[in-house]
Amino acid sequence: MSVRRVIAVFGLFVLLLSGCDGPADPAAETSTSVGPTAAAPVLRPGWQPLTVPAPPGGEGRLLLRDAAACAGRWFLVGGVVDAAGGTRPAAWTSVDGTTWTVVAVRADSFYGRQNVLSSVACRDGRAAVIGAKTGGAHGYPRISTWRQLPDGTLVEVQASFETFGGPTAVNVSRLAAGAPGWLIVGNRSAGAASWVSSPEAAEFALVEGAPELASDPVGVTWAFDAVAAPPGWLAVGGLLPAGRIDRDPAVWSSPDGRSWRRTVLPGGPEYEEMQRVTLVGGVPVAVGLRGATFGAWRQEASGWVAAGTFGRRAGAGVPGVASLVAAGDRLVAAVTDGARHSVWVSADRGGSWREAAMPLDVSAGVDRDVALVAVGDRWWLAADDGTRAGLWSAAGVGA
Protein backbone atom coordinates (compact mmCIF):
# COMPACT_ATOMS: atom_id res chain seq x y z
CA MET A 1 0.00 0.00 0.00
CA SER A 2 1.37 3.44 -0.84
CA VAL A 3 2.73 5.48 2.04
CA ARG A 4 0.02 8.12 1.71
CA ARG A 5 -2.55 5.46 2.62
CA VAL A 6 -0.76 4.13 5.69
CA ILE A 7 -3.39 4.24 8.46
CA ALA A 8 -2.89 3.78 12.18
CA VAL A 9 -4.02 0.44 13.59
CA PHE A 10 -6.85 2.11 15.47
CA GLY A 11 -8.09 3.97 12.42
CA LEU A 12 -7.98 0.84 10.28
CA PHE A 13 -9.81 -1.12 13.00
CA VAL A 14 -12.63 1.40 13.02
CA LEU A 15 -12.80 1.45 9.23
CA LEU A 16 -13.09 -2.31 9.05
CA LEU A 17 -15.86 -2.24 11.63
CA SER A 18 -17.81 -0.07 9.25
CA GLY A 19 -18.29 -3.15 7.09
CA CYS A 20 -21.12 -3.98 9.48
CA ASP A 21 -23.18 -1.25 7.86
CA GLY A 22 -24.19 -3.57 5.06
CA PRO A 23 -22.91 -6.35 2.81
CA ALA A 24 -20.63 -5.58 -0.09
CA ASP A 25 -22.52 -6.24 -3.29
CA PRO A 26 -20.46 -5.97 -6.49
CA ALA A 27 -23.64 -6.36 -8.52
CA ALA A 28 -25.33 -3.36 -6.92
CA GLU A 29 -26.01 -0.21 -8.93
CA THR A 30 -22.87 1.78 -9.68
CA SER A 31 -24.23 5.32 -9.91
CA THR A 32 -26.61 6.98 -7.52
CA SER A 33 -27.65 10.43 -6.37
CA VAL A 34 -29.85 11.61 -3.53
CA GLY A 35 -32.95 9.50 -4.09
CA PRO A 36 -33.36 6.51 -6.44
CA THR A 37 -32.01 6.78 -9.95
CA ALA A 38 -31.06 4.45 -12.76
CA ALA A 39 -27.39 3.84 -13.42
CA ALA A 40 -26.14 6.25 -16.10
CA PRO A 41 -24.01 5.06 -19.02
CA VAL A 42 -20.28 5.09 -18.41
CA LEU A 43 -18.50 8.12 -19.88
CA ARG A 44 -15.78 7.43 -22.46
CA PRO A 45 -13.11 10.15 -22.28
CA GLY A 46 -10.83 10.50 -25.27
CA TRP A 47 -7.72 9.52 -23.35
CA GLN A 48 -4.41 10.53 -24.94
CA PRO A 49 -1.29 8.75 -23.64
CA LEU A 50 1.64 10.95 -22.64
CA THR A 51 5.31 10.03 -22.40
CA VAL A 52 6.94 10.11 -18.97
CA PRO A 53 10.72 9.89 -19.45
CA ALA A 54 12.84 7.57 -17.31
CA PRO A 55 14.88 9.46 -14.70
CA PRO A 56 18.62 8.88 -14.37
CA GLY A 57 20.03 6.48 -11.82
CA GLY A 58 19.60 3.04 -13.34
CA GLU A 59 16.83 0.90 -14.73
CA GLY A 60 13.62 0.30 -12.87
CA ARG A 61 9.85 0.51 -12.99
CA LEU A 62 8.24 3.92 -12.66
CA LEU A 63 5.98 4.56 -9.67
CA LEU A 64 3.46 7.38 -10.23
CA ARG A 65 1.74 8.65 -7.09
CA ASP A 66 0.47 12.25 -7.33
CA ALA A 67 0.20 15.32 -9.57
CA ALA A 68 -0.43 19.06 -9.25
CA ALA A 69 -0.59 22.16 -11.45
CA CYS A 70 -0.41 25.91 -10.91
CA ALA A 71 0.70 29.09 -12.70
CA GLY A 72 1.28 27.34 -16.04
CA ARG A 73 3.39 24.53 -14.60
CA TRP A 74 2.52 20.85 -14.06
CA PHE A 75 4.20 18.43 -11.64
CA LEU A 76 4.15 14.64 -11.36
CA VAL A 77 5.84 12.72 -8.52
CA GLY A 78 6.56 9.18 -7.48
CA GLY A 79 9.70 7.11 -7.72
CA VAL A 80 11.54 4.24 -9.32
CA VAL A 81 11.73 0.68 -8.02
CA ASP A 82 14.52 -1.60 -9.23
CA ALA A 83 14.55 -5.36 -9.71
CA ALA A 84 15.77 -5.90 -6.14
CA GLY A 85 12.94 -3.81 -4.68
CA GLY A 86 15.07 -0.76 -3.94
CA THR A 87 13.39 2.61 -4.45
CA ARG A 88 14.46 6.17 -5.18
CA PRO A 89 12.49 9.43 -5.54
CA ALA A 90 11.52 10.80 -8.95
CA ALA A 91 9.64 13.83 -10.24
CA TRP A 92 8.67 15.35 -13.57
CA THR A 93 7.41 18.72 -14.79
CA SER A 94 5.75 20.22 -17.85
CA VAL A 95 4.94 23.71 -19.15
CA ASP A 96 2.05 22.55 -21.35
CA GLY A 97 0.80 19.31 -19.76
CA THR A 98 1.91 17.36 -22.83
CA THR A 99 5.70 17.24 -22.93
CA TRP A 100 7.27 16.14 -19.65
CA THR A 101 10.85 16.44 -18.42
CA VAL A 102 12.64 14.94 -15.44
CA VAL A 103 13.13 17.15 -12.38
CA ALA A 104 16.55 16.93 -10.74
CA VAL A 105 16.14 15.44 -7.24
CA ARG A 106 18.74 15.91 -4.51
CA ALA A 107 18.40 13.80 -1.37
CA ASP A 108 20.48 14.43 1.75
CA SER A 109 19.57 11.53 4.04
CA PHE A 110 19.72 7.75 4.01
CA TYR A 111 15.94 7.39 3.82
CA GLY A 112 15.54 10.42 1.59
CA ARG A 113 17.55 8.64 -1.09
CA GLN A 114 14.98 5.82 -0.90
CA ASN A 115 11.84 7.98 -0.71
CA VAL A 116 8.82 7.43 -2.90
CA LEU A 117 7.19 10.85 -3.34
CA SER A 118 3.51 10.57 -2.45
CA SER A 119 1.90 14.02 -2.25
CA VAL A 120 2.70 17.18 -4.25
CA ALA A 121 1.26 20.69 -4.17
CA CYS A 122 2.36 23.88 -5.90
CA ARG A 123 2.03 27.65 -5.63
CA ASP A 124 3.41 30.35 -7.94
CA GLY A 125 4.72 27.65 -10.28
CA ARG A 126 6.90 25.98 -7.66
CA ALA A 127 6.35 22.61 -5.95
CA ALA A 128 6.71 21.12 -2.50
CA VAL A 129 6.42 17.39 -1.87
CA ILE A 130 5.99 14.75 0.82
CA GLY A 131 7.88 11.48 0.46
CA ALA A 132 8.59 8.48 2.66
CA LYS A 133 10.37 5.18 2.96
CA THR A 134 9.41 2.48 5.42
CA GLY A 135 12.37 1.38 7.49
CA GLY A 136 14.17 1.40 10.81
CA ALA A 137 13.83 -0.87 13.82
CA HIS A 138 10.06 -0.50 14.02
CA GLY A 139 9.29 -0.38 10.30
CA TYR A 140 7.68 3.06 10.41
CA PRO A 141 7.46 5.35 7.38
CA ARG A 142 10.43 7.75 7.47
CA ILE A 143 8.91 10.99 6.25
CA SER A 144 10.74 13.69 4.30
CA THR A 145 9.50 16.92 2.80
CA TRP A 146 11.00 18.41 -0.34
CA ARG A 147 11.06 21.92 -1.77
CA GLN A 148 11.95 23.29 -5.19
CA LEU A 149 14.86 25.68 -5.62
CA PRO A 150 14.81 28.57 -8.12
CA ASP A 151 16.81 26.43 -10.58
CA GLY A 152 14.06 23.78 -10.47
CA THR A 153 15.93 21.20 -8.39
CA LEU A 154 13.86 19.36 -5.81
CA VAL A 155 15.81 19.16 -2.56
CA GLU A 156 15.14 17.29 0.66
CA VAL A 157 14.34 19.46 3.68
CA GLN A 158 16.14 18.54 6.89
CA ALA A 159 13.85 18.02 9.90
CA SER A 160 14.15 16.43 13.32
CA PHE A 161 12.77 12.89 13.58
CA GLU A 162 10.05 14.03 16.01
CA THR A 163 8.63 16.51 13.47
CA PHE A 164 6.91 13.73 11.55
CA GLY A 165 7.85 10.68 13.64
CA GLY A 166 8.53 10.03 17.30
CA PRO A 167 6.46 8.33 20.01
CA THR A 168 3.22 10.20 19.20
CA ALA A 169 3.38 9.72 15.41
CA VAL A 170 0.48 8.08 13.56
CA ASN A 171 0.53 9.21 9.92
CA VAL A 172 1.20 12.09 7.54
CA SER A 173 -1.54 12.43 4.97
CA ARG A 174 -1.70 15.27 2.42
CA LEU A 175 0.08 18.49 1.46
CA ALA A 176 -1.80 21.62 0.37
CA ALA A 177 -0.62 24.97 -1.01
CA GLY A 178 -2.19 28.40 -0.96
CA ALA A 179 -1.68 32.08 -0.32
CA PRO A 180 -0.71 31.53 3.35
CA GLY A 181 2.05 29.09 2.36
CA TRP A 182 1.95 25.31 2.82
CA LEU A 183 -0.06 23.01 5.05
CA ILE A 184 0.21 19.31 5.82
CA VAL A 185 -2.55 17.42 7.62
CA GLY A 186 -2.25 14.08 9.31
CA ASN A 187 -2.69 12.45 12.68
CA ARG A 188 -0.88 11.98 15.99
CA SER A 189 -1.83 9.94 19.03
CA ALA A 190 -3.68 13.05 20.29
CA GLY A 191 -5.84 13.10 17.15
CA ALA A 192 -5.81 15.21 14.00
CA ALA A 193 -2.74 17.43 13.55
CA SER A 194 -1.29 19.95 11.12
CA TRP A 195 2.12 21.10 9.99
CA VAL A 196 2.59 24.66 8.71
CA SER A 197 5.33 26.29 6.67
CA SER A 198 6.24 29.65 5.21
CA PRO A 199 6.09 30.24 1.42
CA GLU A 200 9.62 28.82 1.08
CA ALA A 201 8.57 25.36 2.41
CA ALA A 202 11.97 25.28 4.10
CA GLU A 203 10.66 24.09 7.46
CA PHE A 204 7.40 22.64 8.76
CA ALA A 205 6.23 23.26 12.32
CA LEU A 206 4.09 20.57 13.97
CA VAL A 207 0.76 21.68 15.49
CA GLU A 208 -0.15 18.85 17.84
CA GLY A 209 -2.96 18.76 20.37
CA ALA A 210 -4.61 21.94 19.05
CA PRO A 211 -8.03 22.61 20.60
CA GLU A 212 -10.93 21.41 18.38
CA LEU A 213 -8.51 19.89 15.85
CA ALA A 214 -7.25 17.21 18.24
CA SER A 215 -9.32 14.58 20.02
CA ASP A 216 -11.20 15.57 23.17
CA PRO A 217 -14.06 14.24 25.32
CA VAL A 218 -16.45 14.80 22.39
CA GLY A 219 -14.65 12.23 20.26
CA VAL A 220 -11.55 11.01 18.44
CA THR A 221 -10.57 13.05 15.38
CA TRP A 222 -8.90 12.01 12.14
CA ALA A 223 -7.78 14.35 9.31
CA PHE A 224 -7.37 13.25 5.70
CA ASP A 225 -6.98 16.28 3.42
CA ALA A 226 -6.93 20.08 3.23
CA VAL A 227 -7.34 22.89 0.73
CA ALA A 228 -6.59 26.60 0.74
CA ALA A 229 -9.94 28.37 1.26
CA PRO A 230 -9.77 32.14 1.82
CA PRO A 231 -8.95 33.53 4.27
CA GLY A 232 -6.99 30.43 5.31
CA TRP A 233 -7.36 26.67 5.26
CA LEU A 234 -10.09 24.04 5.25
CA ALA A 235 -9.37 20.49 6.45
CA VAL A 236 -11.64 17.45 6.30
CA GLY A 237 -11.88 14.09 8.00
CA GLY A 238 -14.02 12.46 10.62
CA LEU A 239 -14.83 12.28 14.31
CA LEU A 240 -15.55 9.10 16.24
CA PRO A 241 -18.05 10.21 18.91
CA ALA A 242 -17.53 8.92 22.43
CA GLY A 243 -19.35 5.62 22.90
CA ARG A 244 -19.72 4.93 19.15
CA ILE A 245 -17.87 2.75 16.65
CA ASP A 246 -18.67 4.73 13.49
CA ARG A 247 -17.26 8.12 12.44
CA ASP A 248 -19.23 11.22 11.53
CA PRO A 249 -17.90 13.63 8.86
CA ALA A 250 -15.94 16.57 10.23
CA VAL A 251 -14.61 19.85 8.81
CA TRP A 252 -12.07 22.23 10.30
CA SER A 253 -11.37 25.83 9.31
CA SER A 254 -8.30 27.87 10.22
CA PRO A 255 -6.89 31.29 9.33
CA ASP A 256 -3.29 30.15 9.81
CA GLY A 257 -3.08 26.35 10.11
CA ARG A 258 -2.47 26.64 13.87
CA SER A 259 -5.81 27.53 15.45
CA TRP A 260 -8.81 25.53 14.28
CA ARG A 261 -12.59 25.55 14.48
CA ARG A 262 -14.37 22.20 14.21
CA THR A 263 -17.71 21.47 12.56
CA VAL A 264 -19.14 17.97 12.88
CA LEU A 265 -21.93 17.17 10.45
CA PRO A 266 -24.96 15.23 11.64
CA GLY A 267 -24.18 11.55 11.29
CA GLY A 268 -26.30 8.46 11.20
CA PRO A 269 -25.68 4.83 12.17
CA GLU A 270 -23.49 4.31 9.08
CA TYR A 271 -19.79 5.07 8.85
CA GLU A 272 -19.16 8.51 7.34
CA GLU A 273 -15.98 10.51 6.78
CA MET A 274 -14.63 13.06 4.30
CA GLN A 275 -11.38 11.92 2.67
CA ARG A 276 -10.68 14.51 -0.05
CA VAL A 277 -11.71 18.13 -0.56
CA THR A 278 -11.42 20.69 -3.36
CA LEU A 279 -13.01 23.92 -4.54
CA VAL A 280 -15.26 24.03 -7.61
CA GLY A 281 -16.38 27.49 -8.60
CA GLY A 282 -15.11 28.65 -5.22
CA VAL A 283 -17.41 26.21 -3.39
CA PRO A 284 -15.79 23.57 -1.12
CA VAL A 285 -16.89 20.02 -1.94
CA ALA A 286 -15.63 16.92 -0.13
CA VAL A 287 -15.90 13.24 -1.03
CA GLY A 288 -15.50 10.29 1.29
CA LEU A 289 -17.16 7.19 2.68
CA ARG A 290 -20.88 7.09 3.46
CA GLY A 291 -21.84 3.66 4.66
CA ALA A 292 -21.44 1.15 1.84
CA THR A 293 -21.09 3.89 -0.80
CA PHE A 294 -19.03 6.97 -1.54
CA GLY A 295 -20.68 10.27 -0.71
CA ALA A 296 -20.19 13.97 -1.37
CA TRP A 297 -20.74 16.95 0.90
CA ARG A 298 -20.98 20.57 -0.20
CA GLN A 299 -20.66 23.85 1.70
CA GLU A 300 -23.62 26.16 1.12
CA ALA A 301 -24.61 29.50 2.63
CA SER A 302 -26.49 27.67 5.37
CA GLY A 303 -23.59 25.33 6.12
CA TRP A 304 -22.42 21.91 4.98
CA VAL A 305 -25.00 19.61 3.40
CA ALA A 306 -24.91 16.02 2.16
CA ALA A 307 -24.89 15.72 -1.64
CA GLY A 308 -25.05 12.61 -3.84
CA THR A 309 -23.67 9.12 -3.44
CA PHE A 310 -22.01 6.82 -5.95
CA GLY A 311 -20.30 3.47 -6.23
CA ARG A 312 -20.57 0.64 -3.75
CA ARG A 313 -18.09 -1.14 -1.53
CA ALA A 314 -16.81 -4.39 -3.06
CA GLY A 315 -14.10 -6.92 -2.46
CA ALA A 316 -12.03 -7.45 0.67
CA GLY A 317 -9.82 -4.36 0.38
CA VAL A 318 -10.21 -1.08 2.26
CA PRO A 319 -12.23 1.46 0.23
CA GLY A 320 -11.08 5.05 -0.07
CA VAL A 321 -10.88 8.22 -2.13
CA ALA A 322 -7.50 8.60 -3.81
CA SER A 323 -7.97 11.94 -5.58
CA LEU A 324 -10.49 14.75 -6.08
CA VAL A 325 -10.08 17.70 -8.48
CA ALA A 326 -12.17 20.39 -10.13
CA ALA A 327 -12.06 20.30 -13.95
CA GLY A 328 -13.75 23.53 -14.97
CA ASP A 329 -17.21 23.36 -13.40
CA ARG A 330 -17.00 19.58 -12.95
CA LEU A 331 -15.68 17.39 -10.17
CA VAL A 332 -13.56 14.34 -10.93
CA ALA A 333 -12.89 11.75 -8.22
CA ALA A 334 -10.68 8.67 -8.22
CA VAL A 335 -11.72 6.00 -5.71
CA THR A 336 -11.09 2.39 -4.83
CA ASP A 337 -14.06 0.30 -3.69
CA GLY A 338 -11.89 -2.44 -2.20
CA ALA A 339 -11.73 -4.42 -5.44
CA ARG A 340 -10.76 -1.93 -8.14
CA HIS A 341 -10.00 1.72 -8.80
CA SER A 342 -12.50 3.84 -10.74
CA VAL A 343 -13.05 7.46 -11.80
CA TRP A 344 -16.31 9.39 -11.39
CA VAL A 345 -17.50 12.77 -12.70
CA SER A 346 -20.09 15.20 -11.32
CA ALA A 347 -21.45 18.24 -13.16
CA ASP A 348 -23.57 19.53 -10.26
CA ARG A 349 -21.10 19.95 -7.40
CA GLY A 350 -21.47 16.42 -6.12
CA GLY A 351 -25.23 16.03 -6.53
CA SER A 352 -25.03 13.23 -9.09
CA TRP A 353 -22.18 11.17 -10.51
CA ARG A 354 -21.26 9.15 -13.59
CA GLU A 355 -18.41 6.71 -13.91
CA ALA A 356 -15.73 7.48 -16.51
CA ALA A 357 -13.79 4.67 -18.16
CA MET A 358 -10.11 4.58 -17.25
CA PRO A 359 -7.33 3.98 -19.79
CA LEU A 360 -5.77 1.32 -17.55
CA ASP A 361 -7.53 -1.24 -15.35
CA VAL A 362 -6.20 -0.92 -11.80
CA SER A 363 -7.31 -3.44 -9.20
CA ALA A 364 -7.06 -2.65 -5.49
CA GLY A 365 -3.86 -3.72 -3.79
CA VAL A 366 -0.36 -2.86 -2.75
CA ASP A 367 1.49 -0.22 -4.82
CA ARG A 368 -1.50 0.45 -7.08
CA ASP A 369 -2.56 4.05 -7.38
CA VAL A 370 -4.62 6.52 -9.39
CA ALA A 371 -4.08 10.29 -9.18
CA LEU A 372 -5.76 13.23 -10.93
CA VAL A 373 -4.94 16.84 -11.77
CA ALA A 374 -6.97 19.32 -13.81
CA VAL A 375 -6.52 22.71 -15.46
CA GLY A 376 -9.67 24.23 -16.91
CA ASP A 377 -11.76 21.47 -18.46
CA ARG A 378 -8.70 19.34 -19.27
CA TRP A 379 -7.66 16.65 -16.83
CA TRP A 380 -4.80 14.23 -16.40
CA LEU A 381 -4.79 10.77 -14.90
CA ALA A 382 -1.73 8.95 -13.58
CA ALA A 383 -2.36 5.23 -13.05
CA ASP A 384 -0.17 2.46 -11.66
CA ASP A 385 -1.47 -1.11 -11.72
CA GLY A 386 1.47 -2.60 -9.84
CA THR A 387 3.29 -3.74 -12.96
CA ARG A 388 3.31 -0.60 -15.12
CA ALA A 389 2.42 3.06 -14.79
CA GLY A 390 1.30 5.67 -17.27
CA LEU A 391 -0.04 9.19 -17.71
CA TRP A 392 -3.00 10.20 -19.88
CA SER A 393 -4.97 13.38 -20.54
CA ALA A 394 -8.50 14.11 -21.75
CA ALA A 395 -10.51 17.27 -22.37
CA GLY A 396 -14.13 18.38 -22.41
CA VAL A 397 -15.58 15.35 -20.65
CA GLY A 398 -19.27 15.82 -19.86
CA ALA A 399 -21.30 14.31 -17.07
Image (spheres, rainbow, N blue to C red):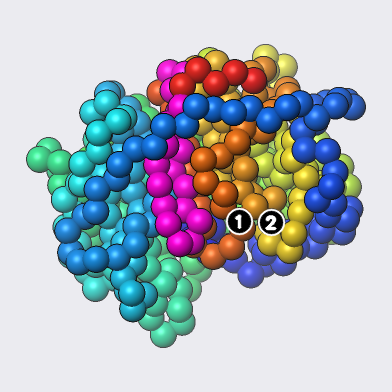
Left of 378 or right of it: where is 192?
A: right
Left of 175 or right of it: where is 181?
A: left
Residue at numbered disc 2: 339
- Quarter of the image where one finds residue 41: top right
Q: Residue at x 33, y 43 (%)?
A: 76
Q: Is residue 391 magenta?
A: yes
Amino acid type at circle 1 is Ser
Q: Which badge, 2 or 1, is on the more N-terminal residue? A: 2
Is disc 2 in contact with disc 1, using a CB cutoff of under 8 Å?
Answer: yes
Calculate the distance from the C-alpha at mark 2 to the C-alpha at mark 1: 6 Å
Q: Is residue 194 above or below residue 372?
A: below
Is residue 153 something that shows in the picture? yes
Q: Nearer the viewer, residue 177 or 68?
A: 68
Q: Residue furthest left?
A: 151
As helix, strand or loop, the secondary structure at mark 2 comes to loop
Q: Residue at x 39, y 42 (%)?
A: 391
Q: In the image, residue 23 lies at what x, y percent?
A: 88, 55
Q: Residue at x 50, y 52 (%)?
A: 369
The quarter of the picture where the C terminus appears is top right
Q: Nearer the viewer, residue 362 or 157?
A: 362
Is residue 233 something that shows in the picture? no
As helix, strand or loop, the secondary structure at mark 1 comes to loop
Q: Is residue 314 magenta?
A: no
Q: In the image, residue 17 lies at what x, y percent?
A: 80, 62
Q: Is residue 283 above or below residue 214?
A: above
Badge 1 crowding class, 10 Å Cα cut-off, few under 14, some 14 to 19, many 20 or more, is some
Residue at numbered disc 1: 363
Q: Which residues are magenta?
A: 376-394
Q: Nearer the viewer, residue 381 or 187?
A: 381
Q: Residue at x 56, y 52 (%)?
A: 362
Q: Residue furthest bottom?
A: 137
